Image (cartoon, helix red, strand yellow):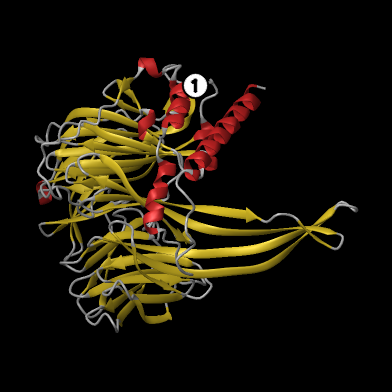
């Protein structure tokens, strides 16, 4: 009965939120019709409709009432923005290695194991364990990330949430521990922070770590505390409950999720700002000035009942939309703009920002159907009327104004992958690879479309103007590396293709799992050998792939990471680091028992 009451409570809460959103949305005026078949860009009217996201007085009242039971024991989060900072862009995106569970500053290698941070000197055959720093991870962590800025390291992971008595609270937390590695042999913990919800993505931008989490409202604890719906941040033993003015009501709260975005300054290990939205998030990307959050939502509308002979007929239509929010990074977080595009996101990698322009790959899915009901005989029948399936690429400027769009990518097959590289987009749909020229964002063009070697899994830059595409044949079988020359973007040329003779031992889509060094042309990955895991190496010589064979240290797990430093390839995992010579294909030294 208690569980039933709890469900009723959340249903009532969501109904209240929905009613509030309806009232707030009604104040914004009627939205204009979609601007065309590709996208529903709402322009100024859409920006005005952000009022439906704003926590107005009534919403404040509801959220304040919910928090009344426990808010008095929590401190208020003070954003602490630096108004004296110089005007103009202050932020820049960190390098591509951010978020990898193995990082290097050039002289040391930093890795995570289940309980702490391992520091190993990168000194060739003289490499050794410098430090093992315990981090209280509770033994339940996953989705590990490391972010390095100057001499500060942020350790980020998701864990189960427990109360003071050790009972599971039914939700997850994203934990952040900040360590100073000014002395690599003696890292010091400077701060421990927690953001409620599981980690969606984190972005390091010039010393500010933006952490995006998602909290499922249907897995709240059994104990019915009124403030449990309000997201909380924990900083060095203090608890901050987000104020109602920092929680935004979304037009579609029925998904029972909260997205929390927190900005953390690594310099002093403090929260700078935080915002929350009553909806989910699927994709996140950032540039030096903005953080973009995107999610897919499905809208269904029904007509008024009509009579057709003995039948009562209701016509339905459904369509997927992608909602994007822009948060301005101005030392804190400010909700700036929003837009809605037709179609569902094709995946978490389907959004990319480059040179101030946002590129989004989406799958248009619109259908209509009618339900016929014969009340006299008590049965119903459903009749499909129409369906539109179409892939599209939409290009927006930094303020979410649509600049250009391109439809009909890959026919009716859904987008399986989308990779953005300089002024091109590589989009796969089933077994078709479409290369899109984005040099003129107002008129993006498909410059080549051809049968691919299979489903594209990864794109990596090689030396010069070449890229490597890792693909899996649609019929199954072995992975394949294919190199393309992009010297002439209008005519990409396939240069070489290599079938991998051993299956990867881990998930190559994970950060850093596929080692690729453009300067040397080396690519590497853990692969399943005959009786143990090996580390395979391939070199790109500018015209073709050379299969260098296997490096076989005593132990190479499937999640080993490769790092190339001063001519040595370090194969890293928490149990050991193998120092190898990639030219002579020899193991030079092994740093064992890295966990101390």
> Which of the 4 image quadrants contains residue 418?
bottom left
Residue 204 image offset from top left, x and y in percent: 23, 46
Which of the image's four quarters has the C terminus? top left
The answer, for residue 110, to whether it is visible in the render is no
Q: Residue at x 31, y 73 (%)?
A: 442
Name which quarter of the figure residue 444 lies in.
Answer: bottom left
Q: Residue at x 35, y 76 (%)?
A: 435
Q: Nearer the viewer, residue 539 or 280?
A: 280
Residue ID at (44%, 16%): 165
Callout 1: 10 Å neighbours few (<14), some, many (20+)? some
Q: Percent from the top left, x then y, of residue 525?
A: 31, 60
Report the side of 256 relative to 372 (left or right): left
Q: Position of residue 500 (x, y in %)?
A: 37, 70
Please, what secondary structure does the residue beneath circle 1 have? Answer: helix
Q: Is residue 470 above or below residue 117?
A: below
Q: Is residue 381 left or right of residue 234?
A: right
The residue labelled by disc 1 is 226
Residue at 17%, 48% in the rendered image: 91
* Left or right position of 8 against 452: right
450 or 470, nearer to the observer: 450
Q: Is residue 124 above or below residue 229?
A: below
Position of the N terminus, as image quadrant, is: top right
Total labels: the figure holds: 1
Q: Is residue 103 visible?
A: yes
Q: Which residue appears farthest toward the right when viewing the image? A: 376
């Amino acid at each position: 009965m208690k569980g039933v009451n709890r469900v009723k409570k959340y249903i009532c809460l969501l109904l209240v939120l929905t009613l509030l959103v309806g009232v707030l949305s009604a104040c914004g005026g009627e939205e204009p019709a979609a601007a065309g078949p590709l996208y529903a860009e709402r322009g100024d009217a859409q920006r005005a409709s952000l009022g439906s996201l704003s926590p107005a007085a009534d919403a404040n009242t509801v959220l304040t009432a919910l928090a009344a039971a426990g808010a008095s024991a929590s401190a208020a989060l003070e954003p602490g923005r630096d108004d004296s900072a110089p005007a103009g862009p202050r932020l820049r995106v960190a390098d591509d290695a951010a978020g990898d569970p193995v990082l290097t500053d050039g002289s040391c290698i930093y890795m995570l194991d289940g309980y702490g941070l391992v520091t190993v000197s990168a000194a060739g055959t003289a490499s050794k364990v410098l430090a093992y720093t315990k981090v209280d991870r509770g033994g339940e962590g996953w989705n590990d990330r490391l972010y390095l800025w100057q001499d500060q390291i942020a350790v980020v992971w998701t864990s189960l949430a427990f109360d003071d008595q050790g009972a599971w609270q039914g939700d997850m937390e994203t934990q952040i521990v900040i360590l100073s590695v000014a002395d690599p042999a003696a890292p010091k913990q400077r701060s421990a922070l927690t953001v409620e919800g599981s980690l969606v993505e984190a972005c390091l931008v010039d010393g500010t770590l933006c952490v995006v989490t998602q909290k499922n409202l249907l897995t709240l604890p059994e104990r019915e505390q009124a403030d449990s719906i309000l997201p909380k941040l924990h900083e060095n033993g203090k608890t901050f409950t987000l104020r109602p003015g920092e929680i935004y009501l979304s037009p579609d709260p029925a998904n029972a999720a909260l997205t929390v975005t927190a900005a953390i300054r690594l310099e002093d290990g403090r929260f700078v700002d935080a915002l929350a939205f009553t909806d989910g998030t699927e994709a996140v990307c950032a540039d030096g000035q903005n953080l973009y959050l995107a999610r897919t939502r499905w809208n269904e509308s029904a007509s008024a009942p009509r009579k057709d002979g003995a039948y009562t007929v209701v016509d339905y239509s459904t369509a997927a939309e992608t909602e994007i929010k822009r948060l301005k990074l101005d030392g804190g977080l400010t909700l700036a703009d929003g837009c809605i595009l037709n179609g569902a996101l094709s995946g978490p990698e389907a959004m990319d920002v480059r040179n101030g322009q946002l590129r989004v790959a989406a799958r248009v899915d619109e259908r209509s159907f009618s339900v016929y009901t014969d009340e006299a005989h008590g049965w119903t029948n459903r009749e499909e009327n129409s369906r539109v399936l179409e892939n599209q690429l939409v290009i927006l400027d930094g303020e979410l104004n649509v600049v250009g769009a391109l439809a009909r990518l890959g026919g009716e097959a859904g987008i399986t992958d989308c990779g953005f590289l300089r002024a091109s987009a590589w989009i796969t749909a089933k077994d078709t690879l479409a290369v899109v020229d984005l040099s003129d964002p107002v008129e993006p063009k498909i410059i080549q479309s051809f049968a691919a070697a299979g489903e594209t899994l990864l794109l990596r830059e090689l030396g010069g103007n070449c890229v490597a595409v890792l693909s899996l044949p649609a019929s199954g079988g072995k992975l394949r590396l294919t190199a393309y020359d992009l010297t002439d973007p209008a005519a990409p040329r396939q240069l070489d293709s290599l079938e991998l003779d051993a299956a990867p031992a881990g998930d190559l889509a994970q950060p850093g799992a596929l080692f690729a060094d453009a300067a040397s042309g080396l690519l590497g990955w853990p692969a399943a050998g005959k009786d143990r895991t090996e580390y395979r190496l391939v070199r790109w010589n500018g015209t073709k792939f050379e299969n260098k064979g296997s490096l076989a240290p005593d132990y190479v797990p499937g999640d080993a990471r490769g790092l190339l430093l001063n001519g040595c390839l370090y194969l890293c995992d928490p149990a050991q680091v193998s120092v190898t010579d990639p030219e002579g294909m020899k193991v030079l030294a092994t740093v064992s028992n890295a966990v101390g």
